[in-house]
Image: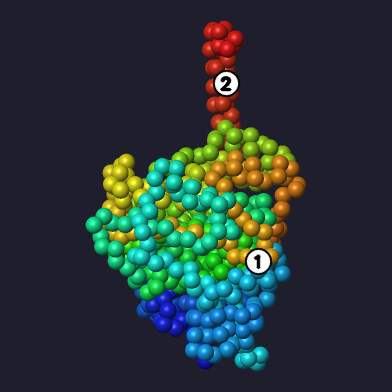
Amino acid sequence: MPVQPALGSERIGLLPADKFSMAEGRCDHCAHQPALWYFQDDLVALPKPGAGDTPGLVWLGSPQLVPQARYDGTSLQTADGSTLKLRLTPKIATNRSYFDASSEAFFRQREVRVRGEWDEAGQQFVARTIWPRDYVINAGKLPLQPLSGSDNLQGFVRQAEGGARADFAVRKVWQRPGAPEADLAGKPVLAIVLSGAQGDDDEAYGGHFAIATGRLGPQGEWSDWMVNNFYSLDSYSEKGIVASALPMDNYLMDLNSGQQYYRPSYMLVAVLNDARTAQAYQSNVNQVFREFYAHHFSYKHAAANCTGISVDILRKLGWQWPQQGPTNRLKAVGAFGYMAAKDLSIASGRKAFSYFTEEQTRLHPAVAFDALGHDLLAMLGGQPGRQLGGFEQQLQSDVAAVMLVRIPQLPSSRAFGSAPAYSIDEFMARAPADRSKWQVVPVEPRPFPEELMDEQARRNLRTSAWPVAALLFAIAAIGTAWSWRRRQRLRADMHHPERLRA
């Protein structure tokens, strides 16, 4: 039978799959609590003893895969001539979209790679992830098309309203000067992954951000790259998403949780001559995940979101891209007062305040994608604008080529998305002015059991990461400074009447 184990001859990111073994989340004898608590009804890959520096857990979801087949709507015609009856995994009740006739038409046009599970009783393969095999990155076979002027990273992302309905596209924007136009298959990669705005969720115009590691396949395949995906652990995702390291095909194409079923995505891929840069990132993010699952810190939509957590690791390693500062500290005061009064909640005001005061390359997925990409290309072009540190010099010397990839949204019952918002003002301009008319998806809280917490997690539970008193002090200080500046300007205007006439 052409069904293979999910941990067969493939890789998981940079690592051979045989360094892992499969386990169910309800694994009482496994030594990977508290992470396993989040996967009680699912399948994960755990590192084997002596596997070395590996993720503590990889979310697989499915035990088997069909690596090459054609889909006819009811069955898979595999590469060896076999026919497998196919059934789709059920739709999660809270999921607002799912595979439909337009999805079927899309996959009928191409070969597919399918993750799922063989149902012995029903003699059928139950598909959970369907990946289009023609989505390849033939890096060495593409012409060089550098970015220039208005043809920039933001333009690539915004093109065709974010490219949700466009074709899959790959563009080589940089290659090491003097290097032969050789195939880059097999080389390691460090990829920055940006997802766009959702089309029918007014809280999701900012997009999503992640960083992936892996190797280009022999024909430019990249479905087995490992994505480091941060989401809130303290609520249930309506699509079944759980923060984790997971294979790229699951991240993008899972029938319920895949990013491509509800928005377009984009990647900036640094193809490397040496794996050390990608390994350094992966090693550090592995540790961050352990702390995250242990509740040593919590996901926060401004101060510690998918973008901030991811890029903080790069900055810790030594990548010092230019920061852009907060959006507007004075607006933060007004936002705090308005939201606190409107919702009768200090927490709501505090959240609004943090959006305006957070560093923008930590807050906005699209701003981080643009800033990192621009800085990388500047480094590679010999014009970084600063003295490079050790990690930056290593990155500069290791990159063989830089690719841009546009991944369209998969046709489904979901509304088409668009490019992500690059600022709070752009976000708010897209959403209805009347917040009561926003389309939102309510989610249920998921409190972590205190009996699984260590002492540090219990301390975090008892104390606020940002005490309200400190927040109010900061707001008062900013308000006082603003009033003082206003009085100074008024006094100056009184001494210069011509300013008032102007």
Query: Nearest the camera: 210 or 159?
Result: 159
First in residue order: circle 2 vs circle 1: 1
* Amino acid residing under circle 2: Arg
Query: Nearest the camera: 173 or 195?
Result: 173
User: Would you say the residues marked 2 and 1 are in contact, meaning their CB atoms lie under 8 Å apart?
Assistant: no
Image quarter (top left, top right, bottom left or bottom right) of the C terminus:
top right
In percent of width and height, residue 59 lies at 52, 72
Query: Nearest the camera: 74 or 276?
Result: 74
* Residue 456 visible, this orientation: no
Q: Which residue is painted at 65% across and 82% down in the image?
A: 74
In percent of width and height, residue 419 lies at 56, 51
Q: Which residue is painted at 38% across and 58% down in the image?
A: 172
**Circle 2 sits on which residue?**
486
Q: Which residue is painted at 58% across and 58% down in the image?
A: 164
* Residue 125 falls in image quadrant: bottom right
- Most extreme residue toward the right is 436
**Circle 1 sits on which residue?**
412
* Mark 1 Cα-neighbour bin, 10 Å: few <14, some 14–19, many ≥20: many
